[in-house]
Amino acid sequence: MPAAAVTLQPSEPVTRVSVLLPLPLAGPYTYAVPEGEEISRGTVISVPFGKRTLPGVIWDTPADEKVPAAKLKTLGLPFDVPPMAEEMRRFIDWVAGYTLSPQGAILRMALSVPAALDAPNPIEVLRPTGMQVPVKLTAARQKVLDFLKDGPAQTASALAELAGVSTGVVKAMVQAGMLRAHPLPEFAGPARAPDPDFAVPTFSPEQKDVADILTAAVEQGGFGVSLLDGVTGSGKTEVYFAAVSAALKAGKQVLVLLPEIALSAQWLSRFEGRFGVRPQVWHSEIGPVARRKAWRKIAHGQIPVVVGARSALFLPLSNLGLIVVDEEHEGSFKQEDGVLYQARDMAVVRAQFAKVPIILASATPSLESLANVEAGRYTRLELGSRHGPAGMPEIAAIDLRKDPPPRGRWIAPGLERAVNETLEAGEQAMLFLNRRGYAPLTLCRTCGHRFACPNCSSWLVEHRARQRLVCHHCGHTEPTPQACPSCSDTGSLVPCGPGVERLAEEAQTLWPEARLAIMSSDMLGSPEKAAELVNAVQAREVDILIGTAMMAKGHHFPHLTLVGVVDADLGLGGGDLRAGERTFQLLHQVSGRAGRAEHPGRVLLQTAAVEHPVLQALLAGDRDGFIAQEMAERRYHGMPPFGRLAALIISAPDAGMADTLARALARAAPHCDDLMVLGPAPAPLALLRGLHRRRLLVKAPRSLKLQPLISDWLASVPIPNAARVTVDIDPYSFL
C-alpha cells in the first residue's frame, strides 16, 4: 500500500491536478487535491480509476478546469519513492509524440515494476543485549552467542541456520532478553560500489587520445554524442570504461545499453575486472524480488551503474552522468512489440533531456549514425587497429559453384580442410549459420505436405533436440510427428535446409573426436548458460563452436583462429531496405571473432554469389567503400537516413475486415508535395498470431513532420473495435 508518512513538497496551492496513468490512454486525467494538501509535479501517487486503485504520476499538463468539481475523484496517498524527475517526464512526452503512442503506454514502461512502489516490509536482525548470562547456559544458546560474537547481526531464521540450532532456541533467547531485534535499513547490505581506480588499464597512444576526449566530455558535462568507431578487437570497451570511470568519480550514475543482455557474460566480467564489482543488470530474466529491489535502489540513487537491454532506458536514473550504447548498429535495439521505438535513438534523446554525454560504440556503425556525423550532429572517434599483437583476419571466399559440398551436406571441401588444419594446430574453429533449429522446413516426400504454423504465414522449424516443430514468430509448438498428417505415410518426412543443429550433426560426423558446442538462443536460454559456454570456450574445452548471430557480438576467444560462414548469402535477398547493411555488419562482426590474440585468424565465406557487392567489400576489407556506396544509393532514392519512412500495419481477425480498413486508409491518405503512400498490400507475414495483416508505407523527405500528418489521417477514418492500426515510425522490419 502507499506510504502515508511521505511529506509532499509544497508548490503553489492547487485544487486539481493532472495525473498520468500507466495505461494506453490518450493523456492525463484530472483529480481533486485533498483539502489542505499541496502536491508537487512528478509525485507518484495512488488514484481511484473505475473500480481499481492505480499508481499514477502528477503530470505537467494543466488540469482540466471544465470538469465539474462534483465529478472529480480525489487523490490517494503518495508512494514511498522519489518523485519522477522533470527530465524523465519530458522524455516520456517526447517518446509518446514521436512514436504516436499514448503517453500512458510510455509511462507503463517507466513504472514497469508496480511492486517496487511499495516500501518493503521492515527486516529485523538480532544482536546480543549484553545482559548477564544465566548460570546454566545451554549448549545451543552458547552456539548462538558464539556466532554473533564473531559474525554480523542476522535475521532470526538465518541465525538459527548458521548457528545450527532450531528457531525455537532463537525465539526463546529473544523472550529471555538475551537477544534484541534491530530494524535493518532498506538498502543495507554488503554491496560495494564500483571503484574507478581498481584496475586502470595501460592504453596505446591511439586509445589514450580517444579515452581522454571521452573523459573530458563527462567531466565538462552537457549533451553531446560521440560515435566510437573502432575495428573489432580495438579495445572500444576499455576506452569507454574510462568515461564510465570519470562519471563515477563525479558521483554520477551511468546507463549502458547492450543489444541482448544474454550475450553480456564477457562484458560483465570485463567490467568486474576493471571496477572490482559487477554492475546492476536489468533484463527480463531477473526474478520479481530482485527486480523490485533493483528498481527501488535505482530510484533512490543507490546504484551507480546499470547495464541492460533496451527496457533499461526507462529506469528512474535521476542522477545520470553518462549513457553508453554498445553495438549501436544492432537491429535488436528496435522494439517490435507494444510501443515501437528505436532504443539507440531514444537514448540520444534521453541524454539530451538529461544534459549528459552519450557514447555510441560499434565496429560497423549504422548508416543513421554515420549520416549524423556527416551532418555535424555527432563527433566521430576512431580506433583503427587491434589492441596488442593481434592483426585483422584474412578473409577469403569459397565459391560453392566451383567447390560444392557433397549431396546432403553443407560444409564445402575447402572449409573442411581448413577446420582440419585448425584442429591439428590445437586451435579453435567457429562455424556460423544464422538459422536456429535443425531445419527451416519439413515436408512429406510422398504427398508434398509442408508443416506450416496455424497462426502465422510461416513454416514450422524443426528443433530435433527438443523433438518439436516451432514457429519462431508466435511461439506455437507441436510434437514432431512420426507420420504425415495429410497422407498418413510413415518415414516420408524429410528436413529441408540446414539449421545450426543439423550443421552440428554434420560436424560431429566429420570430426568425431572434436568437442562441439552450439551457441543459439534456443539451446542456451538464459544469461547463466550463455556465460558457462563462453567460459568453456575460453578455457579451451570446446574445439568447434557452432552458432547463430549470438556468436557475432563482442565475444573475445583468444584461441579461436578460424571462422567459417556456411551460408554467406543468407539475408541478402528479399528486397529489404537494410538487407545489405545488416548482412555486411553481421559478417564483419562474426569475422572479427577470429585471430584476436597472437595467432593470426582467417575467415572463409561459403557463397554462391561471390560477385555480390556486400561480399566483395568484405573480401577486400573495404568497409568504408561499402558504406560510401550504400549511402549514395540511399541518398539518391531518398531513403533513410536521408528520407523518412513510416509504416501503418492493419491487423484484424478477419481478412475481409483488414482489406476494407486498409483500402479506407489508402483513400484517406494525405496529399502533399514529396509525400508518397505505397499500398495497401498484404504484409510478408500476412497472418501473424492469428491476425490478418495489411501494410501501408509512407515515404517522405526528412524536412516533413510525419507525426501530425499521420495523426490527422488516422483520426479521419473510423477503426472497428476488432481491428487495430499500429504506426511504426522509422521501421526496421518489413515483415
Image (tube, rainbow, N blue to C red):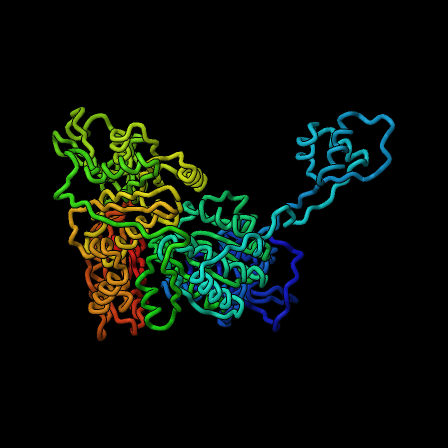
- Residue 445 in percent (x, y) is at 13, 31
Instruction: Determine the residue positioned at 54% across, 45% down.
Output: 290
Q: Is residue 702 something that shows in the picture?
A: yes
- Residue 526 in percent (x, y) is at 42, 40
Instruction: Determine the residue positioned at 26% across, 56% down.
Output: 621
> In the depicted view, which residue is nearer to us: 730 or 76?
730
- Residue 11 in percent (x, y) is at 61, 71
Instruction: Determine the residue positioned at 66% across, 67% down.
Output: 36
Total marks placed: 0
> In the depicted view, which residue is nearer to us: 157 or 594?
594
Looking at the image, residue 386 lies above or below residue 39: above
Q: Quadrant of residue 667?
A: bottom left
Q: Quadrant of residue 465?
A: top left
- Residue 53 in percent (x, y) is at 53, 53
Q: Quadrant of residue 491?
A: top left
Looking at the image, residue 388 lies above or below residue 63: above
> In the depicted view, which residue is nearer to us: 49 or 590?
590
Asked whether, in this view, residue 143 is left or right of residue 282, the answer is: right
Instruction: Determine the residue positioned at 42% across, 57% down.
Output: 236
